[in-house]
């Protein structure tokens, strides 16, 4: 081992040993690891529930689970995946790790609050374990009233309190990010020099701060209504169930942007690096994140077209839902334009990004189907909605999360993951994903409703395809878990900047960041993604020469 | 780096005292924004039901009695004054005045909670605690001769809103206790009094919430019946 590819003597992972140095740490990088381990466990818990759902749906009559157990499984899948995996996924792991590094600060503005947020997350997770041990929950992740307040015999109170508690973890993370991005940027790091991941996380944090408390109070009202038997939401007691849906979706629609916006930020980072180009239309991509956050607050009614709503309200919500597609389209077009005439290389993170682009586009466009009031009458509560949602959340958010984890893994661990395995698992994931969820669009369009444990025999072929796909998907998820763990000990030592990427986290830290990130506060003198530009003609000439000699020239050797 | 050495109150990850103070202030305002949205959910429910069953709101609001609520409003507004004077004393580095005003604020806050407890006790005696001890006023009136479930909803919201407000008061009192101890131990100076200011912001916020709760819950009945 030569000295230049050995890890430095002192870095954040060996700064201290023992459980105290981890469980009482205020280092944002270690807290990122605490979150990473916790949400990975939650991901596999939620995934296990999903796998049982798919097994049940292998046959029309369902052989595996009793009906009420089936209801508990899809509830557990939804609650765990949404509240305990997707919401914290990128912000709490990559965000915690990267925000201070990207702005050039030693830590987040409130390191202790950051640690508290993880403990709050754990308390919320313990509620979920308690629910599982006390017999499960069967309301669906939406806790719709009056079923949840008056009829369900399962442990709804614990679930609502768990979600209530968890919300504060999300709020505190968002608060920390906003303050850090506002106040702790290094000299020269102006707003329009910030990496786009920061813009995305800033927009995400705004939603977390402003929407989460509304969910919190809604959950409190559900819990107290169950306890006191007073009708805020139960019509039999004088309450209004539609009010519940308004309050729930006022959070839960913006929440889907909490889940996807950070992913969009990761995509901007990775695509720029592997195309060796500045993100096309940087300012538009930056501002579109804020536009998504703002519009995202005004579209919740599109979940309720069939719940009872004035047609004028419906039309307004429909119109604004169409508008929210505009900033998303701005991003997608600009990413595609970034690839144009870039020197694209296909390492694992980039494979995930390309997967994201295709799947997110399908997911986004089918969202427009659902945003139109007429079509939604037919598609509401069918598998079409399930497929749309999973294209955005699994095809979009989870793909982006995997892209980001692979991309920054060398910086987080100081070691490389095995590239060949990475590419293989990215391909397996993509194929498994398509096979699992594409048939669900057709099933939904043909009228298969969601949340049923049995179905008519005509739907079996497509359901078998979907279940088969889910087994491939499972392999695609287990593989990274295995080789990432393997690489912690046996992975190649990573150089300080293996992708030759731009950004303070790559250029101003060593192979692996020290405990306080930067020995000297860095000064920023250039725009984000300032990859060296070369005349296209020159690159073309070089490539032609390379092809003539039977070799590919080094990609993007602009420097 | 050199700035740290002189001021032990600046944490290691901040460049200087100013950055630390600005961060704390922004963080506090964002937290208050969260709190506003938390209460906003309750205000939404209140608005909807008041619009649906205004006659219930008038009758039930009338039962609350404005004397104790009025006294409490005055007490809280006074506590905001003493809190502001406390922050001012901290800015000028007057330790004794700071501790005095903090104690005065805490005393007023405790008075508020005491009066609130008396009110809650009265509601219990009048059987107006939804879910636990509630009797409908039957017949309600000539236009609505039967018991109306929204009667309970009004009192339910009353307890939710004042209860959550009361929890915030308890939190505020705990924060002020810590601040007073810190002041006693000379943790603050004319250059470092951010925690006092942040506690002040929080206290004022809790007071303002009450300024909205009082008319909406207590005065609605008087507002409608006063004209007759």
Image (cartoon, coloured by chain):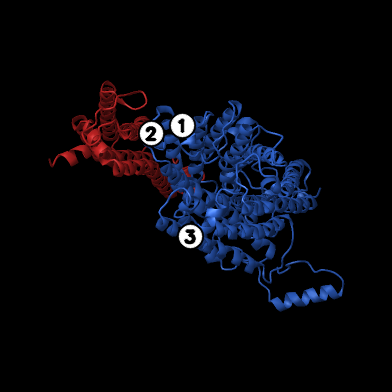
Label 1 near label 3: C-beta < 8 Å?
no
Label 2: element kind:
helix
Residue A451 lies in quadrant: top right
- Badge 2 crowding class, 10 Å Cα cut-off, few under 14, some 14 to 19, many 20 or more, is some
Residue assigned mark 2: A237
Which tint is chain B?
Answer: red
Q: Earlier in the sequence, mark 3 or mark 2?
A: 2
Residue B2 image point, x, y percent: 49, 48
Which tint is chain A?
Answer: blue
Q: Is residue A326 visible?
A: yes
Left or right of residue A86, residue A236 in this image: left
CA separation, marks 3 and 1?
39 Å
Label 2 near label 1: C-beta < 8 Å?
yes
Same chain check for tags 3 and 1: yes
Q: Earlier in the sequence, mark 1 or mark 2?
A: 1
Instruction: Report in which chain the residue with disc 1 lies.
Output: A
Depth order, front residue of A318/A364: A318
Q: Is residue A188 visible?
A: no
Residue assigned mark 1: A150
- Badge 1 crowding class, 10 Å Cα cut-off, few under 14, some 14 to 19, many 20 or more, is some
């Amino acid at each position: 081992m030569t000295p230049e590819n050995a890890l430095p003597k002192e870095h954040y992972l060996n700064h201290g040993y023992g459980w105290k140095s981890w469980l009482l740490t205020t280092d944002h990088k270690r807290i990122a690891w605490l979150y990473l381990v916790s949400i990975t466990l939650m991901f596999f818990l939620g995934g296990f529930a999903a796998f049982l759902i798919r097994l049940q749906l292998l046959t029309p009559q369902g052989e595996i689970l009793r009906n009420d157990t089936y209801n508990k499984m899809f509830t557990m899948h939804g609650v765990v995946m949404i509240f305990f995996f997707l919401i914290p996924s990128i912000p709490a792991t990559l965000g915690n790790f990267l925000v201070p590094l990207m702005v050039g600060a030693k830590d987040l503005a409130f390191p202790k609050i950051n640690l508290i947020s993880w403990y709050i997350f754990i308390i919320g997770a313990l509620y979920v374990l308690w629910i599982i041990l006390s017999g499960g929950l069967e309301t669906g992740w939406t806790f719709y009233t009056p079923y949840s307040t008056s009829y369900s015999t399962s442990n709804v109170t614990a679930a609502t309190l768990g979600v209530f508690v968890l919300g504060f973890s999300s709020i505190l993370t968002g608060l920390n990010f906003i303050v850090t991005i506002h106040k702790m940027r290094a000299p020269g790091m102006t707003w329009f020099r910030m990496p786009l991941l920061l813009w995305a996380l800033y927009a995400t944090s705004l939603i977390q701060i402003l929407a989460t408390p509304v969910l919190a109070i809604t959950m409190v009202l559900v819990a107290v209504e169950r306890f006191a038997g007073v009708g805020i939401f139960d019509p039999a007691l004088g309450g209004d169930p539609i009010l519940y849906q308004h309050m729930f979706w006022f959070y839960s629609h913006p929440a889907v942007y909490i889940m996807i916006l950070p992913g969009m930020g990761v995509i901007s980072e990775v695509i720029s690096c592997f195309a060796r180009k500045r993100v096309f239309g940087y300012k538009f991509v930056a501002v579109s994140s804020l536009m998504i956050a703002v519009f995202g607050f005004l579209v919740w009614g599109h979940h309720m077209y069939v719940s009872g709503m004035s047609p004028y309200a419906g039309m307004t919500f429909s119109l604004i839902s169409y508008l929210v597609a505009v900033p998303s389209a701005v991003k997608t077009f600009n990413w595609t334009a970034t690839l144009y005439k870039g020197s694209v290389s296909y390492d694992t993170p980039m494979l995930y990004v390309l997967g994201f682009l295709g799947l997110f586009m399908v997911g986004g466009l089918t969202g427009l189907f659902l945003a139109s009031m007429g079509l939604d009458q037919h598609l509401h509560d069918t598998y079409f909605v399930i497929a749309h949602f999973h294209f955005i959340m699994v095809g979009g958010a989870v793909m982006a999360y995997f892209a980001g984890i692979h991309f920054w893994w060398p910086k987080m661990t100081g070691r490389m993951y095995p590239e060949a395995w990475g590419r293989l698992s990215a391909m397996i994931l993509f194929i498994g994903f398509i096979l699992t969820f594409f048939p669900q669009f057709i099933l939904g369009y043909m009228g298969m409703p969601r949340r049923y444990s049995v179905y008519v025999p005509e739907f079996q072929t497509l359901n078998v395809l979907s279940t088969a796909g889910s087994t491939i998907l499972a392999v695609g998820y287990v593989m990274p878990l295995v080789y990432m763990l393997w690489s912690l000990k046996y992975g190649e030592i990573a150089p300080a900047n293996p992708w030759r990427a731009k950004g303070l986290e790559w250029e101003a830290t060593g192979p692996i960041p020290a405990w306080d990130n930067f020995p000297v506060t860095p000064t920023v003198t250039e725009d984000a993604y300032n990859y060296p530009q070369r005349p296209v003609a020159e690159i073309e000439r070089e490539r032609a020469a390379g092809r003539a000699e039977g070799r590919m020239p080094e990609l993007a050797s602009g420097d | 780096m050199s700035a740290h050495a002189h001021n032990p109150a600046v944490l290691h990850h901040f460049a200087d005292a100013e950055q630390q103070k600005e961060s704390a202030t922004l963080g506090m305002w964002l937290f208050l924004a969260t709190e506003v949205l938390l209460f906003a959910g309750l205000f939404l429910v209140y608005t909807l039901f008041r619009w649906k069953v205004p006659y219930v709101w008038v009758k039930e609001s009338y039962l609350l009695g404005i004397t104790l609520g009025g006294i409490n409003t005055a007490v809280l507004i006074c506590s905001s004054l003493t809190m502001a004077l406390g922050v001012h004393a901290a800015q000028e580095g007057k330790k004794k005045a700071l501790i005095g005003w903090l104690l005065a604020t805490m005393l007023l806050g405790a008075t508020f909670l005491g009066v609130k407890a008396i009110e809650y006790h009265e509601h219990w005696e009048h059987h107006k605690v939804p879910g636990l001890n509630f009797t409908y006023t039957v017949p309600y009136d000539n236009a609505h001769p039967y018991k109306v479930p929204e009667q309970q909803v009004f009192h339910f919201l009353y307890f939710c809103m004042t209860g959550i407000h009361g929890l915030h008061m308890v939190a505020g009192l705990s924060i002020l206790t810590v601040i007073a101890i810190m002041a006693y131990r000379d943790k603050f100076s004319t250059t470092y009094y951010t925690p006092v200011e942040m506690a002040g912001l929080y206290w004022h916020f809790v007071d303002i919430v009450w300024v909205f709760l009082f008319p909406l819950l207590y005065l609605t009945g008087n507002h409608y019946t006063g004209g007759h």
